[in-house]
Amino acid sequence: MTKIVTKHFDEPKLHELETYRRLGGYQGLAKALTMDRAAVVAEVEKSNLRGLGGAGFPTAAKWKTLPGEDKIPGPRYVVVNADESEPGCFKDRVLMARAPHQLIEGLLIAAHAIGAKETFLFVRGEYQNQYDILEQALAEADAAGYTKHASIKLMRGAGAYISGLDTALLETMEGKKAWPRQPPPFPTVAGLMGKPTVVNNVETLSMLPFIVREGGEAFAKIGSAKNGGTVVFSISGHVEKPGVYEVPMGTALRDVLALAGGVRGGKKLKCVIPGGTSMPPLLEKDLDLKLDFDAIRAAGTFLGAGGMIVLDETVDTVAVAHNIQRFLTHESCGQCTPCREGSYWNEEILERMLDEKGTAEDLANLTRVGENITGKVICALGDTVGVVTRAYMSKFPDDFKKRVPSNG
Amino acid sequence: MAKLVKFKLNGCEVEAEEGRLVIDAAKDEGVEIPHYCYHPALGNPGNCRMCIVEVAGAPKPLVACRTGVREGMDVKSDSELAKRAQSSALELHLVNHPLDCPVCDQSGECGLQDYYMKIGQYQSSVREDKQHKDKRIVAGPHVMLDQERCILCTRCTRFVDDVTKTHELGIFHRGHSERIELTPGKVLDNAYSGNVVDICPVGALTDRDFRYKVRVWYLDQTDSVCPGCARGCSISVHTNTKRPWHNDGKRVARLKPRYNPDVNGYWMCDEGRYGFGSLDKDRLGRVLRLKPAKQDVSWETAAAEIAAALGEGDVAFVASGMLSNADWAAAKVLFAGAKFYFTPEPDQVGGEDAILRKREKVPNLKAAENLGLKSGSFDELAHDLESGRVRALYVVERDLGKIWGEDRARGLMDKAKFSVFQGPNKFTVSEWADYRLPATAYVEESGEFTNFEGKISAYQKALDPIGEARPDHEIFHLVAAALKGVPA
Amino acid sequence: MSVFTPEQEKTLVGWTTRYPYSNMGLVEALRSVQEWKRCVTPEAASRVADIFQLPFNRVWSVATFFPTFTTKPTGRHRVGLCHGLSCWMAGSDKMEKCLEETFGTKPFETTSDGKFSWEPMECLGACEQGPALLVNERLQGQATNDKIAALKELK
């Protein structure tokens, strides 16, 4: 299968500049710097590259919402969102550890494309090993003169999941608690310190060297319609070979699972979380689904950041929902009431159900409260609070009914 | 002015300035959209999610506090979807609220109660234990904090961050552990601390002065003006007369700021707010001739005798900016030939700041200035008294003891052949005058003050006068009439 | 006595100049404080606020928001155990008991010698090697009873 960002993962010293350069590294940047900024954006537009941090928003379209220097003069920034913390996702960790220069090159290309002289790489605090590797790679890139047209500064988070949401990330970077902003204005208009800012994910930026080097059309051809190139899945849970797997956009779920060796121990599949625990699960009947942003969405869930968790038949989905709900309650930033109170309430109900103290009314409440939260909160975390439990309830009603005493 | 646009609100075609927040535009039309976090002077963080409305064409319901009016917009705050969203936001606010309404001072003016009656009225489904937090935190000299009642709307923290910039409160911790707390090592003791009680939509921040004194529904409210300084903030006087056995028998229960965009916006200072304590202290209610012996006299007798004394000239008129516009006008006529002493120095000046507080701690010096009245200094007055140039001294609501010290004040007063004290409260000096006349306090009369910027604000009578007390200008008219020999 | 050594003060001031706006260094500065003192106390946060010329309530709101910062000292060795979905499916709840028994402490408690504390953590981004541990900010995969027992040997 065609690989782009993990293509050279067999090279043991890929993280070193020498190896990366030998394999064609920084040629994309060299080419980009000879191109007009608009031409780089046009190439990315042709590539159908979508934001791989979870939202799937077309990257070039996001860049194009940045006002020109004539409209908003002064600095503009690129921020790398390397605050990967969605349960099930670890591909950014691997991409940073194995191919830090690929990310740096992509970042410098993006900086050129939008005219940023300063960029920031925000790494989640728990990725200290990856931070060290990036720091080393950055020193090499600086010494080699790659960062002459745009500087890169590293920054670490402090353990809050919500910091991974773009506007909360900007708040964190500005030395505030990570309370999401409510656009408009969007970060591309008023982002970091109120300046136009592009926030892109590690994997998204890592795709750019290929796109510039080989051309946007070559990238687009690899993927499916409107979903260019490849996507890296982080696969964990009940599979034989957990790990990261890069596949072209539009690869069938069945084939992706096969790469990871299928369900462990010959057990039957219960469900697959496609993009991280915030995403509703897919079922056995969905195995032929072609995995790209649009197809997954049509199936009622999200590609997210490709954090695929495979659950076998032994799993109790009430406990799964409780685990996810507990996570969301812990990570709710507390800014808006429905998420702050609703996540707590949902968790308490599920906990009671696990303690065999559930009632029929609890099921009705989980549904009703969930509906009342989603779409009425500030950010995507809050939406998730209302969605996830309901998704498990609707797909595995028997698991939930078992937790509630029958009237008979 | 921005362009006017037409839009639909709950099916009715209405007009508003383009971009005006839906929540404000609706209020203009008499439609109140429920809200806690939004406050016109403190911004629209949109965190309470109470003001959700349905906007045709929008992919999801929107918060009215962050949505601007556009031409042709179709907004519904009363659709099934909007009502369910508002009601459920209220339900979620109450998941951890203690519901201790019977012992809560906010009861009767609480946003949670009000909206429950208006948009709630659901059966509670919460079976979980409520989270416990601190319920009795002395936040500062005037304010108590109950964290359990707090709904984390952030109004109070925005107030101390954005208005006073004193940062005594903060929202600390995260998610369901989040709470409003005093910033470690700080006390909520800024000059405007009482305002957080007003803006708190629930009973989390209550007034220590008012706490447990009287239920709010027993209070009457009267529009008034704070006499505490030259700003003249619009206020509301809350009085307790129906149940005198409450509120420790005091007639005035509390003062609240009243919105006035031209003068004070939404706020008032603590000095003004809590300065009413002496209002009913040592009130004068009788018209008295004090010399040679204390004797009750009628207003007419007193006026005639005082007029006779004033008629001989060499009069010094001592007053302060406590006089109303009408009082000043009457004083100007009555004391046409007299020397005036009303400068706020030295006893009626104090701290000022860039928010509201003014240096002159009386409300109405501007009216005297507008009438062309000039004040001599109290040093000059002392000198004139000393040298026997003042034959008659007429003091209105000013404590000369505070200016000169009591012994010196007494000595100087005795230099005048004749003296009158007029005012609502007894001072030591008031007992040394020849006549002591009871005047109404500002809450017992209607009138107007002219603030330092020349803005005229009216205050209304909130309480009945004590005894025979009359407004200052009425007393001046009485004496003036006696002086002219015509009945007032 | 100052909360910080002159050397530490220098580091903190360094964070105010590292990024184009001084406040952008705040989270990193608080990370330094946590590292030095194993907690962020109000006194320390207040000094940081002074150095950054920010209101103290702003700094304290940040210090109490992020799980990396603690108000009471963690152990010299801070151990996190991931209880995210994948790690939970890989048996993190059993490892939780193992940590409790090994250190003899409840989550977020520090051993009496100040050496160890452990706490459950949300997804550490090592889902393919669950149950994951975070030992002094370094990820370790596939926690086992033996691996946890070996932590006791840390100096």
Image (tube, coloured by chain):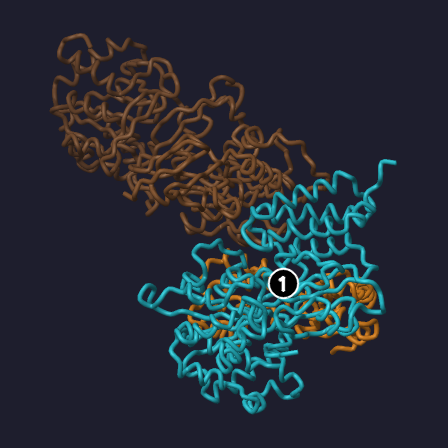
Residue at left 30%, top 37%?
Answer: B262
Left or right? Give the position of B460 relative to B306. Answer: right
Left or right? Give the position of C74 relative to B67. Answer: right
The hue of chain B in the figure is brown
The hue of chain C in the figure is orange
- Give the x, y percent position of residue A125: 60, 70
Under circle 1, the secondary element is loop
* Nearer to me, B284 or B15: B15
- Give the x, y percent position of residue B199: 47, 39
Left or right? Give the position of C130 relative to B72. Answer: right
Label 1: few (<14), some (14–19) or many (≥20) C-alpha neighbours in 10 Å = many
Look at the image and tell me in which quarter the N terminus of chain A lies. Answer: bottom right
Which residue lies under the disc numbered 1? A303
Residue at left 25%, top 34%?
Answer: B455
Above or below: residue B354 compared with residue B345: below
- Give the x, y percent position of residue A261: 77, 73
Provide the letter of the chain coloured cyan.
A
Label 1 sits on what residue type? Leu
